[in-house]
Image (cartoon, rainbow, N blue to C red):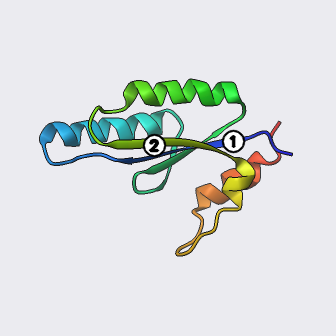
């Protein structure tokens, strides 16, 4: 059984003002720099190898989260992520590679 997990960050941030747009852009850039991949607009995922890694990145997300808006973070097993139903569209190349590769790492 794989011990890998996926962190998923989902957010709706305001973009009405120049400051709001700056906060949105900085948060999105932070997620990418911290190893998250965009799954779809405002939904980012990151593969984690342990609970300690999840805790580390969760603390980073909390420290960078803008004060306005709505942000959710959930952790699921890599198996649950791989078994996700896709109702329209298809898995991105990145999702397919990471899901398949992560099952055989370590």
Q: What residue sits 29% from the left and 32% below the top?
A: 67
Q: What residue sits 50% from the left and 32% below the top?
A: 34
Q: Write down the quadrant of residue 48 in the picture.
A: top right
Residue 60 left/right relative to 68: right
**Res 48 label:** none
Q: Nearer the viewer, residue 94 or 71?
A: 71
Circles 2 and 1 in contact, beta carbons < 8 Å = no
Which label lies toward us, 2 or 1? 2
Q: Which residue is mark 1?
A: 5
Q: Secondary structure at mark 1?
A: strand
Q: Nearer the viewer, residue 28 or 69?
A: 69
Q: What residue sits 72% from the left and 34% below the top?
A: 49
Residue 36 left/right relative to 20: right
State the image coordinates of residue 95 (x, y, percent, origin top left).
62, 56
Q: Secondary structure at mark 2?
A: strand
Q: CA distance from mark 2 to mark 1?
A: 16 Å
**Res 72 label:** 2
Q: Residues within 10 Å of mark 2 (few under 14, many from 20)?
A: few
State the image coordinates of residue 105 (x, y, percent, origin top left).
80, 41
Q: Write down the quadrant of residue 17 in the picture.
A: top left
The answer to whether 10 is drawn above or below residue 60 in the figure is below
Give the residue furthest to the left: 17
State the image coordinates of residue 103 (x, y, percent, origin top left).
80, 48
Residue 22 left/right relative to 70: left
């Amino acid at each position: 059984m794989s011990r890998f997990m996926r962190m998923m960050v989902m957010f709706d941030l305001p973009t009405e003002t120049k400051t709001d747009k700056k906060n949105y852009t900085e948060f999105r850039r932070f997620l990418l720099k911290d190893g998250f991949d965009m799954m779809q607009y405002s939904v980012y995922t990151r593969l984690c190898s342990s609970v300690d890694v999840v805790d580390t990145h969760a603390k980073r997300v909390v420290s960078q989260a803008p004060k306005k808006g709505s942000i959710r973070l959930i952790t699921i097993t890599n198996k649950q992520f791989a078994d996700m139903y896709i109702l329209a569209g298809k898995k991105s190349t990145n999702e397919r590679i990471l899901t398949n590769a992560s099952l055989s790492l370590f």
